[in-house]
Image (cartoon, rainbow, N blue to C red):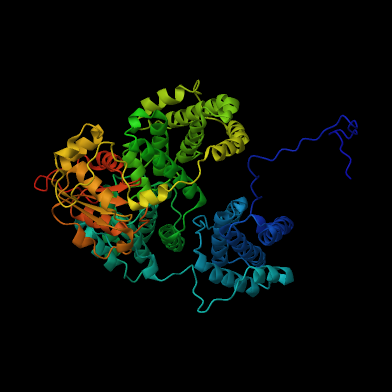
């Protein structure tokens, strides 16, 4: 036992003494030179990491509450962590740039798999900077690249005289690490793996073809620059990729190549300027910094560009992150509530709680997604924006996921949206106990959001509504919350969530056959309705009764006597009849989910006389993409419909998403499918 003393050496009084230990907000940076320049510090850090790896192994074997995916993440973290330990020891013994690249990627991947180990990315950067590799940033590995990267890291360490040791070998064996055959280096993927799909926009075909030719050049730098620009050119077939980074890295590389200019370099600079202009000439911070203080390191810029290409490839192929899945679940909950409202004829303008949730969640989706003019949005992000009436390109340059002050804007939005879900528990015992606290948290998070946006010089879409709505829960703070206030907010929210879950479970009704009803397409029909209505021709005047909501009647005016394509669900005769009656359709081409697994016949379904294509995305996952692309190319409005297939719900989504595009085939203006 260690006796505690005051700074001047006197013993502390016995029973009245207490010791308060508080974790720091952030860790102190490593000393100059990084871990590998300080052997004692390196040994301590690696010893701590190996102890955590052993704890991960124990948890993976003993914690029965873990899901299969969570257990797989722990196993993967052990393999990555052990390779990082051995590789750092090898680098300390014999520094090598390629080995440091591998360590950077291992650390970045470990951070994604196990966020508690995020400090290792900073520690690798602290090693790279004094070595002159300021351009080095970690690139996450795809799962099938792990074995090769671990093997090559261990080989490099062995060449420096370092082995994992008996315990390290045991960890690798436990994690199932095997030497792959053939052994392909993840640092140098094939050019085909780094090449994005070609653009479908006719006005950019020439640019794409020119870049494809330049990507076959002799100099790797020119090839890498051409591939980076191909991502910008083909953005209509990509989503959630940082195109500003691609433009930025390409310009830095091209300026370095221009020190020994060739015709290919000059042509690439011209194409870069044209693509930069198409995006509205956003700021390129790397190029601005390089112009002020040029590094003159051409080889480093070539490698940095290659790593950026690998990062873009990872962005295309990565799995859904836990944070994105959590947001998706919250959005589906809100859309389900919207569908319940619409089935009763209640639109969001009459439900301010739902309107605010949808608005905040749609903005959260947009600001957590890399956006640019012409870059395709993920389907659910696009749907949320359309449902909420938010411009998908609102403040797109200033609200990129990594460019909004010190705390991303999507974090502020999610913090404001979460307590709104608890409003559904009003009138319950939970609300009697916690209602005042919920209202306080809503006002606190709302004021923080509005203050953060105001400090950034922005204004949210529909901000006047949000200010009035959130202000109704209490006074809104004038300044953003500091870290201590944020921690207190999260602690207060965590305190009430268990009771909220228990109350929600108590209120849950026994399972009803609602899912089956939705899949079978059972409509929420008005009370007075004929027993049968023809589904092959326009409905009769019997459907003109007064019991259809106004938004259904407005959509009927656009669709009367026209053909509609519906993709998803299980075709149902009663529901087909209800939709045809409600909108007086001449034909409803309903393609069931089972009939359209791969979208091979999209061209045949979207004909010139199609008024609108409805994509029931609840049942289609990503299978709707082909039909969506065909509809866009042919100028046919399409609706991504997340709810049940009642006429009221379908009509509201049509009116919200494509009301301005609906018109007779003869007067319909073809929409710009580039999004520019």
The picture places residue 502, in percent across and down from the top left corner, at: 59, 38
Q: Quadrant of residue 331?
A: top left
In the picture, measured across the screen, residue 171 lies left or right of residue 392, that is right
Pick the residue in front: 628 or 321. 628
Pick the residue in front: 419 or 458. 419
Q: Is residue 501 visible?
A: yes
The picture places residue 532, in percent across and down from the top left corner, at: 22, 47
Residue at 58% over, 76% down: 179
Residue at 59% over, 54% down: 114
| Image height of 190 relative to 244, above or below | below
Residue at 36% over, 70% down: 192
Q: Number of numbered discs present?
A: 0
Q: Is residue 206 visible?
A: no
The picture places residue 441, in percent across and down from the top left corner, at: 54, 29
- Quarter of the image with the N terminus is top right
Q: Quadrant of residue 654?
A: top left
In the picture, measured across the screen, residue 181 lies left or right of residue 61, that is left
| Image height of 496 relative to 164, above or below | above
Residue sticking out furthest to the left: 666
The picture places residue 367, in percent across and down from the top left corner, at: 41, 42
Residue sticking out furthest to the front: 531
In the picture, measured across the screen, residue 370 lies left or right of residue 440, that is left
């Amino acid at each position: 036992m260690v006796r505690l003393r005051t700074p001047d050496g006197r013993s502390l009084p016995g029973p009245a003494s207490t010791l308060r230990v508080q974790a720091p907000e952030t860790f102190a940076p490593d000393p100059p030179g990084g871990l590998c320049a300080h052997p004692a510090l390196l040994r301590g850090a690696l010893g701590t990491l190996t102890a955590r790896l052993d704890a991960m192994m124990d948890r993976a074997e003993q914690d029965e509450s873990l899901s299969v995916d969570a257990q797989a993440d722990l196993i993967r973290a052990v393999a990555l962590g052990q390779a990082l330990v051995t590789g750092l020891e090898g680098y300390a013994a014999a520094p090598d740039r390629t080995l440091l690249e591998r360590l950077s990627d291992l650390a970045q991947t470990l951070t994604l798999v196990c966020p508690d180990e995020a400090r290792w990315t900073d520690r690798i950067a602290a090693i790279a900077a004094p070595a002159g590799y300021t351009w080095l940033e970690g690139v996450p590995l795809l799962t099938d690249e792990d074995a090769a990267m671990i093997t090559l890291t261990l080989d490099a360490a062995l060449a420096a005289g370092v082995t994992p040791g008996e315990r390290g070998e045991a960890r690798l064996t436990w994690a199932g690490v095997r030497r792959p055959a053939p052994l392909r280096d993840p640092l140098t993927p094939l050019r085909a793996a780094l090449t994005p799909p070609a653009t479908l926009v006719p006005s950019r075909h020439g640019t794409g073809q020119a870049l494809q030719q330049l990507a076959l050049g002799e100099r790797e730098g020119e090839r890498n620059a051409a591939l980076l620009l191909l991502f910008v050119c083909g953005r209509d077939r990509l989503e959630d990729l940082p195109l500003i980074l691609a433009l930025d890295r390409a310009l830095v590389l091209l300026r370095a190549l221009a020190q020994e200019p060739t015709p290919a370099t000059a042509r690439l600079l011209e194409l870069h300027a044209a693509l930069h202009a198409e995006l509205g000439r956003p700021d390129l911070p790397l190029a601005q910094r390089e112009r002020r203080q040029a590094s003159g390191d051409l080889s480093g810029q070539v490698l940095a560009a290659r790593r950026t290409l690998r990062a873009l490839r990872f962005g295309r192929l990565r799995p859904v992150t836990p944070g994105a899945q959590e947001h998706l679940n919250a959005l589906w909950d809100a859309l389900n509530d919207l569908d319940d409202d619409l089935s009763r004829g209640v639109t969001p303008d009459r439900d301010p709680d739902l309107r605010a949730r949808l608005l905040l969640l749609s903005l959260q989706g947009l600001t957590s997604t890399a956006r640019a003019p012409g870059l395709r949005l993920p389907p659910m992000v696009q749907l949320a924006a359309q449902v909420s009436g938010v411009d998908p390109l609102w403040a797109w340059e200033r609200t990129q996921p990594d460019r909004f002050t010190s705390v991303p804007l999507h974090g502020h939005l999610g913090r404001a949206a979460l307590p709104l879900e608890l409003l559904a528990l009003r009138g319950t015992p939970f609300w009697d106990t916690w209602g005042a606290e919920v209202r306080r948290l809503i006002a606190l998070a709302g004021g923080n959001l509005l203050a953060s946006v105001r400090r950034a010089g922005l204004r949210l879409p529909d901000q006047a509504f949000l200010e009035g709505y959130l202000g109704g829960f209490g006074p809104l703070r004038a300044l953003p919350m500091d870290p201590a206030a944020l921690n207190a907010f999260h602690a207060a929210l965590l305190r009430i969530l268990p009771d909220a879950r228990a109350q929600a479970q108590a209120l849950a009704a026994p399972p009803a056959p609602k899912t089956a009803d939705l899949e079978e397409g059972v409509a929420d029909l008005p009370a007075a309705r004929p027993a049968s209505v023809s589904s092959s021709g326009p409905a009769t005047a019997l459907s003109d009764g007064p019991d259809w909501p106004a938004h259904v009647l407005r959509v009927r005016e656009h669709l009367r006597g026209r053909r509609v394509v519906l993709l998803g669900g299980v075709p149902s005769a009663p529901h087909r009849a209800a939709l045809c009656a409600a909108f007086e359709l001449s034909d409803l081409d309903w393609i069931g989910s089972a009939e359209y697994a791969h979208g091979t016949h999209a061209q045949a379904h979207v004909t010139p006389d199609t008024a609108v294509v409805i994509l029931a995305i609840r049942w289609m996952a990503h299978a709707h993409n082909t039909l969506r692309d065909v509809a866009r190319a042919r100028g046919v409005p399409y609706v991504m419909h997340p709810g049940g297939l009642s006429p009221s719900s379908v009509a509201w989504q049509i009116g919200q998403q494509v009301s301005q595009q609906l018109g007779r085939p003869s007067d319909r203006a073809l929409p710009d499918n580039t999004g520019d």
